[in-house]
């Protein structure tokens, strides 16, 4: 394939980062060299990845190559969704409105809160004993 036909987008969610390359094709989605069905077993994660295509009515029109690192399965699925949405905007500026309306261009800022000293987790305190 010609490198000029690619449209790129970088997505982030929690600790996961996804580098997405979009090209015209049959709708094949490859994540780290494997079909995304092998890596994302839950239907919710698959729907999350396909959501930008459903919103823009382009499902099955573009091939997606993703390189993702860090985080877990949910974080990576969210990062891929964010990256695909950004790549679609790079492809066609008119997709920006519907993707923005569905909140797909906004990076989800929620990350794990750090553990504080004197506590068991970020906010869980040890059990209080009166006597």
Image (tube, rainbow, N blue to C red):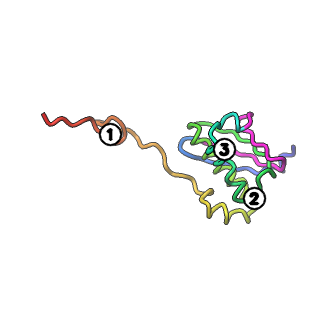
> In the figure, is residue 115 to the left or right of 76?
left
The residue where tag 1 is placed is 124
State the image quarter where residue 42 is shown. Answer: top right
User: Does label 2 or label 3 sit earlier along the sequence?
Assistant: 3
Residue 19 image point, x, y percent: 68, 44
User: Does label 1 or label 3 sit earlier along the sequence?
Assistant: 3
What SS does tag 2 mark?
loop
Residue 104 sits inside the magenta stretch = no
Q: Which residues are magenta?
A: 17-35
The residue lying toward the viewer, choosing from 70 and 53, is 53
Residue 69 image point, x, y percent: 62, 37
Binning the other alpha carbons within 10 Å of mark 1 as few (below 14), some (14 to 19) or many (20 upward) gives: few
State the image quarter where residue 31 is shown. Answer: top right
> In the figure, is residue 59 to the left or right of 115?
right
Q: Give the residue furthest to the right.
A: 1
Q: Marks 2 and 1, how far apart in space?
A: 45 Å
What SS does tag 1 mark?
loop
Look at 30% across and 37% down and name the residue there.
119
Look at 40% across and 41% down and name the residue there.
114
Q: Marks 2 and 3, how far apart in space?
A: 16 Å
Instruction: Verify CB contact (< 8 Å) between mark 1 and mark 3.
Output: no
Binning the other alpha carbons within 10 Å of mark 3 as few (below 14), some (14 to 19) or many (20 upward) gives: some
The residue where tag 2 is placed is 57
Q: Marks 1 and 3, how far apart in space?
A: 33 Å
Of discs 2 and 1, which sits in the foreground?
Answer: 2
Task: From this view, report whether residue 95 is shown above or below residue 128.
Answer: below
> In the figure, is residue 74 to the left or right of 90?
left
The residue where tag 3 is placed is 46
User: Does label 2 or label 1 sit earlier along the sequence?
Assistant: 2
Look at 70% across and 34% down and name the residue there.
38
Residue 34 sits inside the magenta stretch = yes
């Amino acid at each position: 394939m010609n490198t000029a036909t690619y449209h790129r987008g970088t997505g982030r969610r929690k600790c996961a980062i996804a580098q997405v390359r979009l090209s015209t094709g049959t709708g094949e989605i490859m994540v780290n060299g494997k079909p995304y069905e092998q890596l994302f077993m839950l239907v919710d994660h698959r729907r999350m990845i396909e959501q930008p295509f459903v919103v823009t009515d382009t499902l099955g029109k573009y091939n997606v190559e993703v390189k993702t690192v860090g985080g877990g399965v949910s974080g990576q699925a969210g990062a891929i969704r964010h990256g695909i949405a950004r790549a679609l905007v790079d492809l066609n500026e008119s997709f920006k409105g519907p993707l923005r309306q569905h909140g797909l261009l906004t990076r989800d800022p929620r990350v794990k809160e750090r553990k504080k000293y004197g506590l068991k987790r970020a906010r869980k305190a040890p059990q209080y004993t009166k006597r």
